[in-house]
């Protein structure tokens, strides 16, 4: 019996590339025996004609679904929307720009057959810009420290997972989804497989520094309380240092009354510790704010339109 593979592709400014990606999926999957496939294309409120291209791709196709979000919710929210429209035994996520080659999907599927629950593509030579590569390294460090990602595991936007993992992920309904965190809390049977990585042929990455910072911040505030514990440790260390410095100042003045009072040192200490306190309060406020937003049932995404001609839908 054939397995159904669901491809989920978040789309943003990809009117010139998404057609090629779909074509490559068609060629790849038709060459594989034992698999059927479907494609879920999620337009994350792209300002160009991406959804019109998606609509044309869906026309007359019984295995392509197009989802149009009402506004830009971000890549991870778009992935969540796509997961909820999949029906496959295996779900594969890849990018819309063609840099993550769909022709390598067979490697991910073969690795899953070895008994792993999730398989991430690893790139020997990434063709991203220096800025994007730097962001990936920071993200890897953050997920390792805050989310417990194994050091040897490489995490990318091109990955495959079994159905039960996808089902567990879509149970998450809070307004700040972070797919990597959801995967890591679901299973530890995760592997890498090396695939090629292409240069971007058209356009530029949609990730700005602001978006990357927001993604990292969302990752560790949504799935880890380690920042709060770090804040506690810093507070304890600072309090102890201040207490010891106070004892040192008193003793120094006692043994040498001629020592002048250090106004500059006092102001520097005040500025440092006041800034530290405000930083920690801001971090706590961020957690409280997210709790408040979650209690208000803010949506992960809003679907404006769905084009789906798949059998049974």
Image (spheres, helix red, strand yellow):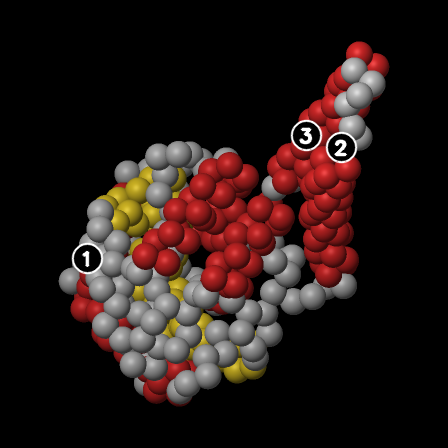
Q: Earlier in the sequence, mark 3 or mark 1?
A: 1
Residue 45 is at least partly visible in this image: yes
Distance Cα–Cα, label 2 vs label 1? 78 Å
Quadrant location, the N terminus: bottom left
Q: Residues within 10 Å of mark 1 (few under 14, many from 20)?
A: few
Q: Secondary structure at mark 1?
A: loop
Query: Which residue appears at 71% of the width and 30% of the height?
Result: 238
Mark with earlier residue (2, 3): 3
> Residue most toward the front?
258
Residue 123's disc number: none
Image position of 37 with respect to 218: above or below: below
Badge 2 crowding class, 10 Å Cα cut-off, few under 14, some 14 to 19, many 20 or more, is few
Image spot of residue 250 (x, y percent)? 82, 19
Residue at x 83%, y 18% (from the top left corner):
257
Tell me the residue that label 2 is attached to.
262
Left/right placement of residue 108 relative to residue 262 reads left
Q: Is residue 27 above or below residue 276?
A: below
Q: Which residue is labeled 3 in the image?
A: 233
Q: Quadrant of residue 206?
A: bottom left
Check residue 33 in the rendering and tell me which mark sits there, or answer none. 1
Near-viewer residue (1 or 117): 117
Instruction: Say whether marks 2 and 3 touch (CB < 8 Å).
Output: no
State the SS at label 3: helix
Of labels 2 and 1, earlier in sequence is: 1
Instruction: Tell me whether circle 2 and circle 1 mark residues in contact (CB < 8 Å).
Output: no
Cβ atoms at labels 3 and 1 below 8 Å apart: no
Q: Nearer the viewer, mark 2 or mark 1?
A: 2
């Amino acid at each position: 019996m054939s397995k159904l593979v669901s491809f989920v592709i978040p789309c943003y400014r990809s009117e010139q590339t998404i057609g090629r990606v779909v074509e490559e999926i068609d060629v790849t999957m038709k060459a594989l025996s034992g698999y059927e496939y479907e494609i879920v294309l999620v337009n994350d409120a792209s300002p160009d004609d991406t959804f019109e291209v998606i609509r044309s791709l869906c026309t007359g196709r019984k295995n392509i679904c197009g989802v149009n979000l009402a506004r830009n919710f971000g890549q991870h929210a778009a992935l969540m929307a796509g997961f909820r429209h999949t029906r496959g035994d295996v779900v594969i996520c890849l990018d819309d720009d063609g840099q993550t080659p769909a022709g390598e999907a067979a490697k991910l599927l073969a690795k899953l057959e070895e008994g792993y629950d999730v398989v991430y593509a690893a790139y020997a030579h990434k063709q991203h810009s220096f800025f994007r590569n730097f962001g990936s390294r920071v993200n890897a460090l953050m997920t390792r420290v805050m989310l417990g990602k194994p050091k040897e595991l490489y995490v990318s936007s091109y990955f495959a997972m079994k159905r039960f993992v996808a089902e567990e992920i879509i149970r998450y309904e809070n307004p700040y989804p972070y797919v990597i965190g959801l995967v890591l809390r679901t299973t530890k049977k995760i592997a890498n497989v090396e695939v090629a990585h292409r240069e971007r042929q058209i356009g530029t990455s949609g990730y700005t520094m602001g978006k990357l910072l927001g993604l990292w911040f969302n990752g560790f505030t949504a799935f880890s309380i380690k920042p709060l514990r770090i804040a506690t440790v810093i507070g304890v260390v600072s309090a102890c240092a201040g207490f010891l410095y106070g004892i040192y100042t008193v003793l120094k003045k006692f043994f040498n009354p001629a020592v002048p009072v250090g106004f500059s040192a006092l102001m520097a200490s005040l500025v440092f510790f006041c800034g530290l306190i405000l930083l920690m309060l801001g971090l706590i406020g961020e957690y409280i704010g997210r709790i408040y937003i979650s209690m208000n049932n803010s949506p992960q995404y809003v679907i404006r339109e769905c084009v789906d001609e798949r059998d049974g839908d």
